[in-house]
Image (tube, helix red, strand yellow):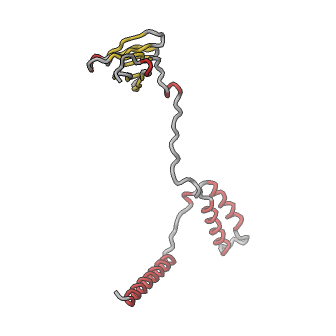
């Protein structure tokens, strides 16, 4: 394409855009858009517009330019009373505050040792709040002050228990590990 042909295409595009713009303006003047704003307005906006209409009525009761000005002013008050500064997004949902009892496990069981045998014969050595000690096999339960505690898994330095449907891992401190293979 040579520069003269490109220039003609640019002029043609500009002319067609101008004609389209003129057609849109003519259609807008010929077919006015009637938008009903009254249904979406709050009650305060309707009260404000009622006072404006009472003040702007002509004394002789004529429906002239004063009525049109009042209608325009009424429309302006309606539009300015809309809440346009509200957030465009929903606020994050509020999270309920957890109580201290729900946040931390309230069982009083402590792990004081483990016995590792073939997979089905491992034991957890647990101590209750009253100081009594129990050898609990894998899958066994022990009664705590607040309910039953079930041993779900036993490892060399830890035991996983289930308490009130939640899983908790009890870890044996390193200084208490006797005869453990590193």
Q: Residue at the spot x=47%, y=79% of the render?
A: 21
**Residue 69, image x and y in percent?**
66, 71
Count of numbered tags: 0
The quadrant holding residue 169 is top left
Q: Residue furthest bottom?
A: 4
**Residue 128, image x and y in percent?**
45, 13
The quadrant holding residue 3 is bottom left
User: Relative to residue 27, is residue 118 depicted above or below?
Assistant: above
Viewer-closest of 124 and 5? 124
Horizontal relation, residue 181 to residue 93: left or right: left
**Residue 113, image x and y in percent?**
39, 16
User: Relative to residue 163, is residue 62 depicted above or below?
Assistant: below
**Quarter placement of the N terminus:** bottom left
Horizontal relation, residue 106 to residue 78: left or right: left
**Quarter placement of the C terminus:** top left
Q: Residue at the spot x=41%, y=13% of the render?
A: 143
**Residue 179, image x and y in percent?**
36, 17
Q: Residue at the spot x=48%, y=75% of the render?
A: 31
Q: Residue at the spot x=63%, y=65% of the render?
A: 76
């Amino acid at each position: 394409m040579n520069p003269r042909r490109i220039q003609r295409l640019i002029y043609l595009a500009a002319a067609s855009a101008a004609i389209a713009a003129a057609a849109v303006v003519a259609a807008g003047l010929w077919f006015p858009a009637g938008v009903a704003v009254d249904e979406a307005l709050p009650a305060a906006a309707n009260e404000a517009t009622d006072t404006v209409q009472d003040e702007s009525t002509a004394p002789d009761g004529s429906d002239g330019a004063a009525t049109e000005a009042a209608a325009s002013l009424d429309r302006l008050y309606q539009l300015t009373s809309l809440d346009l500064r509200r957030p465009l997004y929903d606020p994050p949902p509020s999270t309920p505050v957890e109580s201290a009892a729900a946040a931390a496990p309230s069982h009083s069981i402590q792990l004081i040792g483990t016995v590792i045998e073939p997979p089905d014969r491992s034991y957890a050595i647990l101590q209750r709040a009253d100081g009594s000690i129990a050898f609990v096999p894998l899958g066994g339960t022990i009664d705590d002050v607040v309910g039953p505690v079930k041993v779900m898994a036993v490892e060399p330095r830890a035991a996983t228990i289930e308490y009130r449907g939640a899983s908790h891992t009890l870890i044996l401190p390193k200084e208490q590990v006797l005869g453990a293979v590193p």
